[in-house]
Amino acid sequence: MDVAADTAEVLEWLGAERCLATGRSGGGPHALACAARLESVAGCLVIAGVAPHQAPGLDWLEGMGEEKVDEFTAALRGEGALRHLLQRREGQFRVITEPEIIEELSSVLPDVDRAALSAEHGEELARDFHEAVRTGVDGWLDDDMAFTRAWGFELSETTVPTMIWQGDLDLMVPCAHARGLASALPRASAHLVAGEGHLSLAHGFLDAMVDELVAVH
């Protein structure tokens, strides 16, 4: 919930009375927190975002690739186990290249996501990995731990129009998460896109997502 207070301060500094919230993957919960607790948020877009670990009827790990199952299983065991696992990956992620991304994340990349890692997108993702661990694994660890704990707000509090976009081939955040979010959010519209994965979804449908979001403002 700290993200809502931080965002409120930024909006005040900008002099912005209204805004739109967007979060992709692990950013989804942060966008939803802002939509739930900030009156300034007019609409929310969640792209392949995770659902609460405690969501009723959701097997949270089911459908994830092996790399993600290992990561979140460690998070559920506690901070020490997760830190040990992430620190083993940290060195490689500091210098990882596009071909190495495909090899390292093979268990969570369906063919459509591998295809999306063109030279441009692959290099961009490699730079993201470098920056993510530039100062260590604390941020990565904090996110993983937060995903597996209570979020500090109820999805029912998010009463603004909320768009949920999800690919049915996603092995990082399975499609069941999108269904869980859509069923719990009072004003959700769900787009469960056949044949798309975690990476390919945003690359192929970003314009449609943004058009839908700005239409509510």
Image: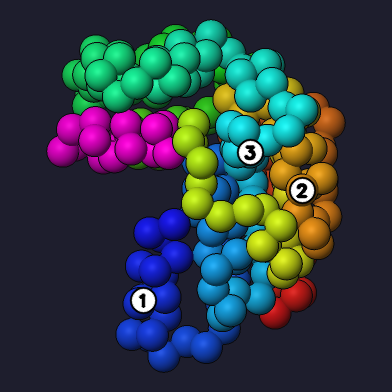
Look at the picture and state if 175 lies above or below 99.
below
Q: What is the spatial separation of the Cα atoms under label 3 and label 1, in whole angstroms?
A: 26 Å
Q: Classify the position of the C terminus by image quarter.
A: bottom right
Mark 1: secondary structure: helix
Q: Main secondary structure of the magenta part?
A: helix
Disc 1 crowd rating (10 Å Cα; few below 14, some 14-19, many 20+) is few
Q: Write the start and end of the magenta stretch as one range.
A: 131-146
Give the residue at the far left of this rendering.
135
In the rendering, which numbered label is found on residue 168? none
- Please tell me whether residue 107 is drawn above or below residue 195 in the rendered image: above
Q: Residue under circle 2?
A: 184
How many numbered tags mark residues here? 3
What is the number of the mark on residue 51? 3
| Marked residue nearer the N-terminal end (1 or 2) | 1
Query: Which image quarter: residue 161?
Result: bottom right
The reply to whether the magenta stretch includes residue 116 is no
Amino acid identity at mark 1: Val
Q: Which residue lies at the image location 72% right of the left edge and 69% below the top edge?
A: 160
> Mark 1 and mark 3 in contact (Cβ < 8 Å)?
no
Instruction: Give the spatial CA distance, label 2 vs label 3.
Output: 10 Å
Find disc 1 in the rendering and name its residue: 10
Q: Name the mark nearer the viewer: 1 or 2.
A: 2
Pointer 2 with pointer 3, Cβ within 8 A: yes
On-image quarter of the N terminus: bottom left
Question: Where in the figure is residue 79, as x and y percent of width and height?
Answer: 30, 24
Q: Do the numbered discs 1 and 2 sit on residues whose CB atoms are within 8 Å?
A: no
In the image, taking residue 150 as reference, residue 49 lies left or right, namely: right
C-alpha distance separating marks 1 and 2? 28 Å
